[in-house]
Image: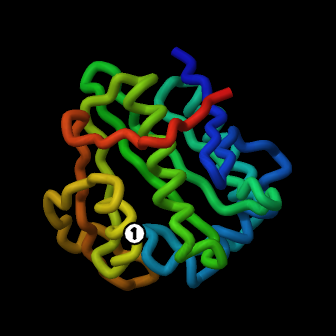
């Protein structure tokens, strides 16, 4: 079952399928030790990882297991990062939300705006009942994004990651359809 990767528009952002030309921006994002400091994997050190990531995004869509979109700023076309859903299970009507933004784009609510648009699409199109997300317990900014869009912290995964010898915990967040607050500003799809 194929899942068409959406093209979504918000007031300030365009969310679209990845193209091969995104590899350099994606590699710059995921090779940043600062951006990746709270991730469950080390920063990339090989540009081919970006190409494999893009291929995996296409494969996910082809298999119908998820959709990841690149995020561009409308005003100047700048690459902001990415957002997406993985692990879509139509039987359980559930999926997991993830996102990663360039640190120059932090503090402008782009993550909140993009995640909200993806969730709006997912609840409307995929008929989800539950979306889950996880974040490192030290990443309060990411936890704040999730809480702004209605996620509830449900628990802590103790010592669930060891990256470069550093052990960390993760918070688990959940958003249930009946608690979802759609935007007053419609998200357009094309």
Where does the image place residue 115, in percent across and percent down from the top left?
47, 51
Q: Secondary structure at mark 1?
A: helix
- Foreground residue, 144 or 138? 144
Q: Residues within 10 Å of mark 1 (few under 14, many from 20)?
A: some
Q: Quadrant of residue 106?
A: bottom right
- Outermost residue toward the front? 184
Q: Check the image and report above or below for 58 versus 98.
A: above
Where does the image place residue 190, in percent across and percent down from the top left?
68, 27
- Foreground residue, 10 or 172? 10
Q: At 37% from the left edge and 39% from the top edge, which residue is drawn?
A: 182
> As drawn, is 75 to the left or to the right of 36?
right
Q: At 48% from the left edge and 32% from the top edge, which residue is drawn?
A: 121
- Outermost residue toward the top? 1
Q: At 20% from the left edge and 65% from the top edge, which residue is drawn?
A: 157
Can you identify the residue that label 1 sits on? 142
- Foreground residue, 50 or 46? 50
> As drawn, is 29 to the left or to the right of 186?
right
Where does the image place residue 38, in percent across and percent down from the top left?
43, 76
- Outermost residue toward the right? 21
> As drawn, is 117 to the left or to the right of 105?
left
Q: Check the image and report above or below for 35 versus 109.
A: below
- Foreground residue, 168 or 127? 127
Q: At 79% from the left edge and 53% from the top edge, which residue is drawn?
A: 22
Where does the image place residue 152, in percent across and percent down from the top left?
20, 56
Q: Check the image and report above or below for 88 versus 86.
A: above
Q: Check the image and report above or below for 131 versus 188.
A: below
């Amino acid at each position: 079952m194929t899942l068409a990767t959406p093209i979504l528009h918000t007031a300030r952002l365009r969310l679209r399928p990845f193209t091969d030309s995104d590899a350099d921006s994606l590699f710059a994002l995921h090779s940043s030790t600062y951006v990746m400091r709270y991730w469950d994997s080390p920063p990339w050190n090989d540009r081919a990882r970006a190409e494999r990531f893009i291929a995996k995004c296409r494969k996910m869509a082809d298999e119908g297991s998820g959709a990841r979109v690149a995020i561009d700023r409308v005003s100047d076309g700048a690459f902001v990062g990415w957002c997406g859903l993985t692990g879509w299970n139509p039987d359980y009507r559930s999926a997991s939300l993830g996102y990663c933004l360039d640190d120059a784009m932090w503090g402008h609510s782009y993550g909140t705006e993009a995640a909200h648009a993806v969730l709006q699409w997912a609840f409307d199109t995929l008929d989800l009942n539950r979306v889950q997300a996880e974040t490192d317990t030290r990443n309060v900014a990411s936890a704040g994004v999730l809480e702004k869009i209605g996620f509830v912290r449900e628990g802590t995964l103790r010592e669930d990651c060891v990256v470069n010898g550093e052990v960390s915990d993760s918070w688990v967040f959940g958003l249930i359809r009946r608690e979802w607050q759609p935007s007053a500003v419609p998200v357009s799809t094309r």
